[in-house]
Amino acid sequence: MSLPAVLYPADDIAARLRALVKKLAVLPDRPQVAAPVLVGAFVFAADLVRAMAEEGVHLETEMIWLRSYGNARVGSALSVLAAPSDHVKGKHVLLVDGVLDKGHTIARSTKLLIEAGAASVKTVVAVDKLHDDAVARADYALYTGVKDFIVGYGMDDAGKYRALPYIGKVEA
């Protein structure tokens, strides 16, 4: 079994992350809480919160757990497995996800955070595919316009390849 082809190598991801964090650290409504969407955002979120700390921004963390893919490559009904708590009330939240495909997960997560009382929500993803029919866009993304089915850096294909240190593409 061969591994997925490298689309974005680990060193490029790290460089883009450092540049992004410099922008996030100086936002007027600087993030106070990182809200990663499990499971796909956990690797990106870990790198992001550590890099933010290096810039002097120490984020609290509030996990959100939604599931839309299951073991398929096509999104299905969105299930909320763990919603944000009132811990986000009155705080500026940075919503973190791995990939924004059609935007349903980001839209639902943003709604959940606002309902929990977040003062503001900014969204950041590793990859925003920029589909024309997407219901949401990320405020910030490491990469945009990817057409491939991607894995690695926390993202998976039916549970496979999540631990790859790079973002790779899976052939159909």
Image (cartoon, rainbow, N blue to C red):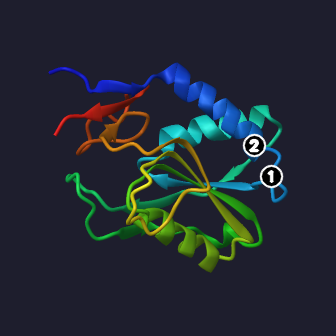
Say which residue appears at 30% left-offset and 33% top-offset. Answer: 169
Quadrant location, the N terminus: top left
Relative depth, front residue between 171 and 54: 171
Tag of residue 163:
none
Task: Estimate the x, y position of residue 46 in percent, counting from the top left.
Answer: 58, 38
Task: Estimate the x, y position of residue 107 in percent, counting from the top left.
Answer: 49, 69
Quarter assignment of residue 8: top left
Say which residue appears at 19% left-offset and 35% top-offset. Answer: 171
Instruction: For label 2, count other residues whose C-alpha is less than 10 Å away and answer few (under 14), some (14-19) or many (20+).
Output: few
Q: Is residue 132 left or right of residue 118?
A: left
Task: Estimate the x, y position of residue 45 in percent, counting from the top left.
Answer: 57, 43
Q: Is residue 150 above or below residue 111?
A: above
Q: Amino acid at mark 2?
A: Lys
Count of numbered tags:
2
Q: Is residue 61 above or below residue 8?
A: below
Q: Amino acid at mark 1?
A: Leu
Relative depth, front residue between 134 and 105: 134
Q: Is residue 25 above or below residue 88?
A: above
The reply to whether the C-beta atoms of the residues labelled 1 and 2 are less than 8 Å apart is yes
Q: Is residue 70 left or right of residue 151?
A: left
Under tag 1, what secondary structure? loop
Quarter assignment of residue 157: top left
- Judged from this view, the residue extending furthest toward the front is 132
Under tag 2, what secondary structure? helix
Quadrant location, the C terminus: top left
Mark 1 and mark 2: Cα distance apart in space: 7 Å
Q: Which residue is mark 1?
A: 27
Tag of residue 23:
2
Say which residue appears at 38% left-offset and 61% top-offset. Answer: 102
Q: Is residue 94 left or right of residue 3?
A: right
Relative depth, front residue between 49 and 82: 49
Quarter assignment of residue 152: top left
